[in-house]
Image (cartoon, rainbow, N blue to C red):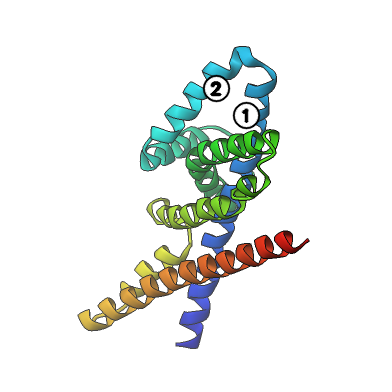
């Protein structure tokens, strides 16, 4: 049982890593796109259209487009198969995080220009909200065989013969996922509230 739990936690670390890197890459891309639109107005409209298309694009379809493009090319062939799948998944989830971060960074810069400091700080909890979504989206890695928490749970339940045990393990896996997200959200809210109170006093 201890080995099974350790295996699950190790798999869950993959979800956290993919979610965090998807957010960071989305922030970088969003920052570049936002600055480009602000500094070079002539490309603002085309970039806005691309961002809008990404925002509306189904993530599962994007996953298999990227998967087929990269598998058929030689770009990632020298990498470990697990690393390759993580990169494919990160690029896919960037289809969500990039538009989201572009919007948030654009709002942040607008508030800063207007001197609305408190409103600009809302980017912190909003970016954390993006991370929650990227973490949830990381579970689609199971569909391409990435060894993450959902894949581990599916493989483990496949070894069980008792229906009750299968339901229990699936429930506990889902519960852990949800409780982790709620705990992270709670800590983020408390930290942000403390930060705002600290800034108000100084």
Query: Which mark, by number, is residue 47?
Result: 2
Mark 1 and mark 2 in contact? Answer it, CB < 8 Å. yes
Tell me if residue 88 comes above or below residue 65 in the rendering.
Answer: below
Report the residue at 58% width, 37% height from top. 107
Q: Quadrant of the N terminus?
A: bottom left
Report the residue at 47% width, 66% height from top. 181
Q: Where is residue 145 in the image (x, y as percent from the top left)?
A: 43, 55
Mark 1, residue position: 33
SS type, badge 2: helix
Q: Where is residue 134 in the image (x, y as percent from the top left)?
A: 49, 52
Report the residue at 67% width, 16% height from top. 40
Task: Confirm whether residue 155 shows in the render.
Answer: yes
Crowd tier of the residue under label 2, counting other residues whose Cα lies within 10 Å: few below 14, some 14–19, many 20 or above: some
Tell me if residue 145 comes above or below residue 113 in the rendering.
Answer: below
SS type, badge 1: helix
Report the residue at 43% width, 74% height from top. 176
Q: Distance between the residues labelled 1 and 2?
A: 7 Å
Q: Where is residue 155 in the image (x, y as percent from the top left)?
A: 37, 69
In the image as oriented, which residue stretches furthest toward the right?
A: 202
Tell me if residue 129 comes above or below residue 47 in the rendering.
Answer: below
């Amino acid at each position: 049982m201890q080995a099974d739990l350790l295996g699950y936690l190790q798999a869950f670390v993959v979800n956290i890593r993919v979610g965090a890197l998807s957010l960071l890459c989305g922030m970088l891309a969003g920052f570049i796109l936002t600055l480009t639109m602000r500094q070079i107005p002539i490309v603002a409209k085309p970039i806005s259209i691309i961002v809008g298309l990404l925002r509306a694009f189904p993530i599962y379809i994007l996953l298999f487009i990227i998967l087929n493009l990269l598998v058929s090319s030689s770009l990632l062939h020298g990498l470990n198969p697990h690393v390759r799948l993580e990169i494919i998944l990160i690029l896919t989830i960037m289809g969500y995080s990039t538009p989201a971060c572009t919007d948030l960074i654009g709002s942040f810069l607008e508030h800063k220009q207007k001197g609305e400091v408190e409103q600009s700080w809302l980017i912190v909890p909003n970016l954390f909200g993006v991370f929650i979504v990227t973490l949830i989206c990381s579970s689609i890695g199971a569909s391409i065989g990435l060894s993450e928490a959902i894949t581990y749970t599916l493989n483990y339940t496949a070894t069980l013969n008792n229906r009750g045990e299968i339901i229990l393990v699936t429930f506990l896996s889902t519960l852990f996922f949800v409780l982790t997200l709620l705990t992270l959200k709670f800590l983020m809210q408390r930290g942000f509230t403390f930060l705002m109170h600290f800034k108000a006093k100084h």
